[in-house]
Amino acid sequence: MTQQQAPTTQPRTSARPPLGPGARRIMAWLSVISGLRAAGLVLFAASVATLLTVLAREAFRVVSSGNGPEASSDWADFVGSHSAGADGLFPSWLTGIDPGHWAWQIAAWGVAGLAIRALADWALSVASQRAASSTKSDLRRRLLEAVLHRSSTSAGARIETGGDSESSSDGGIAVLASRGLDAVDDYYVKSLTAMCSSAVIPVVLLLVVLWLDPISALVLVLTLPLVPLFMILIGKTTQQDTREAQTQLLRLSSHIVELSRGLPVLFGLRRNRAQAQALDDLGENYRRRTLTTLRSAFQSSLALELITTISVALVAVFIGLRLVTGSIGLDTALAVLLIAPECFQPLRDLGSAFHQSQDGIDALRRAEAVVERGRAPHTRQKNQDGGVRVRQVSVAYPGRGPVLTDVNLDISAGSTTVVVGPSGGGKSTLLKVLGGMIDAMPAEHQTPTVLAPSETAWISQTPSFLAATVYDEMGLYTAPEFAETWLAEVDDNGSVQSKSLEPPASDGPQSSAVDSLIGGALTDLGLQDLKDVAPSALSAGQARRLAVARVLARVRGMVLDAGGSRQISLLVLVDEPTAHLDDRAAASVAGALREIASYGSTVIWVTHDPATVPHAEYFLEVPGDGQVVVTYSRTQALDGSRLTKDAAYGDRHTVDIPQAEGQGTDAPREGYLAGSEGNVASRSVVQTLGSLKRITGARLTTALGPLSVNFLTVAFGASLTALSGWLIVRASQQPGMMYLMVAIVGVRFFGLGRASFRYAERLLTHDVVLRAANRLRMTAWRTVGESALSLRTLLRGGAFLDRLVGDVDELRDAMPRVLLPIATNIPVMVGAVVVTSLTVPSATWLVGVAACMSTFCLPWAVTWADRRAESIRRTATSRTLRGVVGMTEAAEDLRGNSLGPHVLRVFRHWDADSLNAARRSAFAAGLGNATTLGLWWLTALLIGLVAWEPVSSGQISAPVAAIPVLLCTALVEPAAQATDALRAWPAFARLVAKIDRGVPEELPSSRTDHDSETTRHNAQTLRIQNVSARWPGMERPAVRGVSGGVERGQALGLTGPSGSGKSTSLAVLLGFLRPEQGEVIVDGVKSDPVTLRGVSAWCPQDAYIFDSTVRGNLALAKPRGQAPGDDELYSVLDRVGLGDVVRGFQDGLDTRVGAGGSNLSGGQRQRLAVARALLTEASFLLLDEPTAHLDHESAQELMEEIDRATRLDAHGVSGPGTIIISHRPADLVYCADVIALK
């Protein structure tokens, strides 16, 4: 039949930025709040303008009467010839007085104005942040639903989001759902707020200015359109840069996720340091691309600020000229000048927010594309009779021919069927199609159909685990309705709380029935002593038994729920459950599956050893050439001699070593979702800054640039406002123009200087922060493996990913928001007090009190209101990152076992906690903004009142008195930023302490793999003598008295039952665990861990296959400058029996293998991993279960090839010494010596 590629779905895109869910509803509220902000500003501006006008008139009266220090014969030339005019901003019926006079009602209206503005600012902050948090929560939920509910794509269909696939990979989705969606904050808090403000505030203020001064309103109407015009022109150059920067970030994040999952492989190949360079290059590319984008965005902000400055200056020129001629009142002039910048501010905010929010817009688009892709219809449907019916099913992977072609089969309910066939034939693919994890591709005039029971249990080749302990993982499958309990293992200190240590309740997750189901299943599979161990710390064989045990407990629970009925409708899909298992463990697995089948379940079992399934009724053979699956009976299988048994060891020297008693009970407890922050003790400011310097490498001289420029930005802004006020009040006295020229030049200088310094500060700050983040990321990478627990705690990559993505990004975002405002605030406050003491000495105490309250009291109050919400939010974000990565990695297991809805419910609970913390944090942040604005505006009013006495007595002039009044209004923004920064300081300090705790005192060097080349290829012998070792936290050694040795060109076997200490012995040989007794000797010299890491290459159990090409995975074994050619690659592939398979791929060596090698079979993945290890040319090669997932014939061929390949190297001399870790006797037939752990 004709095969058709499934079409690649392109997401619907629009030139208009997406509003996101719930945006239209919140925009109405934001518009109303914006109107209130404008009303509050008008009232306050009118009150301040009236107060300064009254002061100016009083000052003129004093001077004109000959009193005060300014009275002289030529006072008219210097001071002016007229008193300041007053138009009367408040009607006399409201105040009861004539224009130009003061009444306390005016002060009351000013207080009302600042109260309205403060409350509106608080409401705007809270509403926008809550909207952003709700949107992120909704998008995360929908993203995870798409991941957990969608089927894997076949026929090469990939989720394309804007031309790249990073965001559709597991790593891209994980980072998008956690850190990526944080960019939505800027979109809602800044962009949508600015949109609403731009639609409301300029209109309201223009109407007010039109009523006060039509000429000024005309100038504003003519100049306001310049802002959006230039915003659009400049913005067109920014969109593509921003998208490329977002793509670079997703590529970096996806690369880190891949590195975290393949960490054991990189260490085994000794390529971790080489990958450090690649990671450094990615980080540097991201920094450069981000700075390019930011430069465009900041240039836009610079242009908008200059346009605003020039436009307001035009208004000021017209007002100044009319003040000199007396054609406008001073109160009207001051009110218009206080209002005019606010007409431009929303448009400026919109322009800046548009560029700053491009990441958020892009995140929205990518998230919606992934969600839409997850809505594709599924092939699998429910079968009422409990059997399996397949019609016209075909599956293909990218770059390969069809794996399954036109499959038709019927399997009766309650039967057990064994699926056999060569590695790579499509056995696992068939199971995934039956389980709904892969959709069949449509063909011409045919509709693929899969009918199966609605309830499915899935036991995969490489099971994934989500919970923190074995007991919790069992509980998640046994009683998923209590998933919140099984996955809520982290307390406030980040410690794992195992449910098995709690007394059982009468009902609920710790009931005796649930505990009995869990304990019984673990005992039957020989895992009863491991219930408090993290699943990530289990060996591969123990992990497989745990996968079977959790399904066994689930089935027994279903039987109990059915009243003891032994007939349940369940499809059980089993993929290579006995790989990595010794005979005893394999027998326990077979017994468990027989029991599951006895309850009426339909069991379909993929295996390379059908002898382990003596109770099977039917056999399916998948030939591997895409043909129709052939069904035959057990009798036919026996006649065809398809049932095989492993060969015996043969004649060799075998050393039996007793197993250390109880070694399995003391393994470390650390799961994927375990918190990594722990109980971090509080630190002083000096300690925090010292730690920050150590982990980021940032020096004081590096930070002085951004700090100095930021201070100058704030200082120039405050000076501009204060000097403008002086100039307007002075102009109202109608002096000669020459007396105003210096001030006019000063206003231009401070206006242009503020914009320029702001641009320079932003660039300098982001450059310093991005460099520091990249250094921190590289430091974290290089410290991996320094601790003994590295292999165990990082096998799943959760803590590692949290360290390289979550912590680094949190610190990167927090540094400029926390450090700069705090460092700038103190000198700014000191400067404000000094200026006030020089201008209005009697008001110095007012500014001093306000400065102290703003610096100390308000942050304390806001921090109290926050009540650790910021820290909880950061912790929740970190947990979300780990949780999303864990869920995406375990998505296949969760889908195959119908646990998706339960896990999503838990995630919604977690996200609700994060949402509540974000809302509480928004409340505190809004409170800080509101109280800061109220404090400084109130101080401005009070200074005007306090200045009445010295002005009326002639001690100071009215223009001088205006300086501190308007200066206080300019201090609102830096003070609010400092308050918010101080609120976030406790969480920032804890974050720094957490990161610092994970960085060793002596930072590792940045040497590359080439540094160890000489020791790596020249070693001849390796021996271990009487070695005993234990993992940290264990009470007893895991292994005792292990001895043995191997020379180049020979092989040493290491065998034993699951849990006997093979992985511990391997860790000693690799240098990841120091022996507490005995020694490891290389060429007759006792070796330290560093030497051991330099002489060996390691192919781990279920070695990770990176989401790249066949060539890319193999090339990892060689340094970058020694990339192997096609002939060498095909040669090593031929040695492991994979050469012809790869040649048959459409793209050959450039065929993509999918995430985790998902486009390859289990056996093909294993062969590729062995081939990769053979390319390393290390002195010693450690192969951990090299024949897992292979049928007997293929396993035998592979071991023969390994023996031939390791006897002689590529130069015709002795090949590497090989240490083979396996439970299968046939794998050890070529070993000269065998160490048997018992």
Image (cartoon, rainbow, N blue to C red):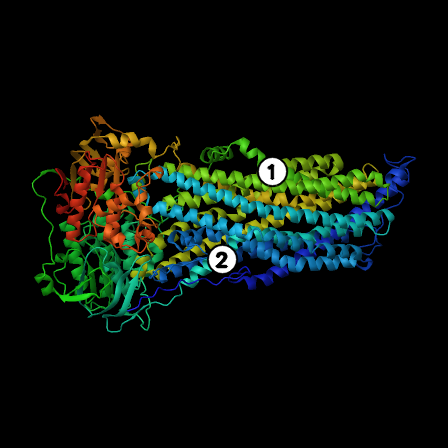
Q: Nearer the viewer, residue 681 or 250?
A: 250
Q: Which mark is residue 824?
A: 1
Disc 2 residue crowd, few under 14, some 14–19, many 20+, Cα 10 Å: many
Indicate the amino acid at tag 1.
Thr
Q: Nearer the viewer, residue 1040 or 1193?
A: 1193
Give the quadrant of the C terminus: top left
Give the quadrant of the N terminus: bottom left
What SS does tag 1 mark? helix
User: In the drawing, does residue 1045 fall left or right of residue 697?
Assistant: left
Can see residue 1052?
A: yes
Q: Position of residue 791 (x, y in %)?
A: 30, 41
Of all residues shown, which one is farthest toward the top? Answer: 1085
Q: Nearer the viewer, mark 2 or mark 1?
A: 2
**Residue at point 37% right, 40% down?**
275
Disc 1 residue crowd, few under 14, some 14–19, many 20+, Cα 10 Å: many
User: In the drawing, does residue 438 fall left or right of residue 1196?
Assistant: right
Indicate the amino acid at tag 2.
Leu
Q: Position of residue 699 (x, y in %)?
A: 51, 32
Q: Nearer the viewer, residue 10 or 529?
A: 10
When the figure is inspected, residue 404 is found, relative to residue 44, above or below; the finding is below
**Residue at point 59% right, 44% down?**
977
User: In the drawing, does residue 505 fall left or right of residue 931?
Assistant: left
User: In the drawing, does residue 695 fall left or right of residue 294?
Assistant: left
Q: Quadrant of residue 1005?
A: top left
How many badges with numbers are in the image? Answer: 2
What SS does tag 2 mark? helix
**Residue at point 21% right, 63% down?**
604
Q: Position of residue 1219 (x, y in %)?
A: 19, 39
Upstream in sequence: badge 2 or badge 1: 2
Q: Which residue is mark 2?
A: 364
Q: CA distance from mark 2 to mark 1?
A: 34 Å
Can see residue 495?
A: no
